[in-house]
Each structure stands twice: as C-alpha cells, then as structure tokens.
Image (tube, rainbow, N blue to C red):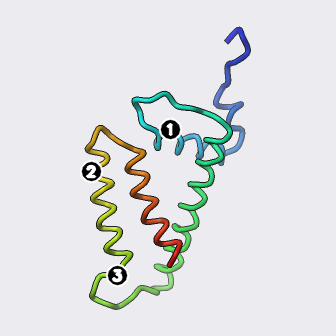
Amino acid sequence: KSKGNFLTLRNACPTSDDVRAYRYLVVSSQYRNPLSFTETALGAAKGALKRMDNIMKQLNDALGDNNLPGNDSKSDIALCVEKELLNFEAALQDDLSMPRASASMFSIIKLAESE
C-alpha cells in the first residue's frame, strides 16, 4: 500500500458496467489460481457480458413474440443446450471449474449467435 501499487475496487471499476465485468471476471476464474486483474481481462469480461446480454435480449424478444418453433422434434440448438448443460454441471462438480462451465455456456451462445 505504501508503494502506491494498491488499487481499490472503487477506483478500478468506476462505472456499473465495470463492476459487473469485475464480478464476471471473478466468477469465471478458477478459484485455486491467483486472479490477474488487468485492463485486458476486464475488457474481455465486458465483451463476454455484452454477448450474453445480446443473446438474452434475442431470447426475450423471441419468447415475447411467441415465435417458437412448433416442431416436436428437438432442434440443433435444443440438443446443444442439453449437451452443454450436462457439461456445465460436470464442470461444477469437478472442483468448481468455472472456466470449463463458462466454456459450455459460450458454446450455447456461439450457436445461438449463428442462428
């Protein structure tokens, strides 16, 4: 602290978007490893949150319009979601591996973005 290399969260994250990105950065990191807090890491977290927000908006719009397929057979995205949910749960059960769990979540987001 006396060397001036001390940073408070209030100074590091002045906006609510920064705070949200910091929270995501912490949650998506492996708890056994030291957290590397850099502007690059915070920027990557902001980008990840932006992708999640965009998909959530698209899903909410689709659900609000009742624009869902009436097909009883499972779509590619439904099969992907089932598979990745199992991977997500397995990652959490494997020593709370949040990086692997996040990868499963982003597999679904990537597929949804291509739809």
Q: Quadrant of the N terminus?
A: top right
In the depicted structure, whether residue 15 falls above or below residue 108: above
Q: How many numbered tags mark residues here?
A: 3
Q: Disc 3 vs disc 1: which is toward the camera?
A: 3
User: Is disc 1 surrounded by few (<14), some (14 to 19) or many (20+) residues within 10 Å?
Assistant: some
Spatial separation of the CA atoms under disc 3 and disc 1: 34 Å
Identify the amino acid type marked 1: Val
Identify the amino acid type marked 2: Ala
Q: Position of residue 45 (x, y in %)?
A: 58, 48
Q: Position of residue 28 (x, y in %)?
A: 47, 44
Which residue corresponds to the image point at 31% horizontal and 60% vertical from the top-left? Answer: 85
Q: Earlier in the sequence, mark 2 or mark 1?
A: 1
Res 6 → quadrant: top right
Identify the amino acid type marked 3: Ser
Q: Earlier in the sequence, mark 3 or mark 1?
A: 1
Query: Looking at the image, do the residues carrying marks 3 and 1 touch, with CB atoms under 8 Å apart?
Result: no
User: Is disc 3 surrounded by few (<14), some (14 to 19) or many (20+) residues within 10 Å?
Assistant: few
The secondary structure type at the circle numbered 2 is helix
Spatial separation of the CA atoms under disc 3 and disc 2: 23 Å
In the depicted structure, whether residue 86 falls above or below residue 91: below
Which residue corresponds to the image point at 38% horizontal and 50% vertical from the top-left? Answer: 101
In the depicted structure, whether residue 92 falls above or below residue 79: above
The secondary structure type at the circle numbered 1 is helix
Query: Which residue is situated farthest in the top direction here?
Result: 2
Q: Disc 2 vs disc 1: which is toward the camera?
A: 2
Q: Which residue is mark 2?
A: 90
Q: Which residue is mark 1?
A: 26
Res 39 → quadrant: top right
The secondary structure type at the circle numbered 3 is loop
Q: Which residue is mark 3?
A: 75
Q: Position of residue 58 (x, y in %)?
A: 54, 74
Q: In the shown orientation, is residue 94 left or right of residue 5?
A: left
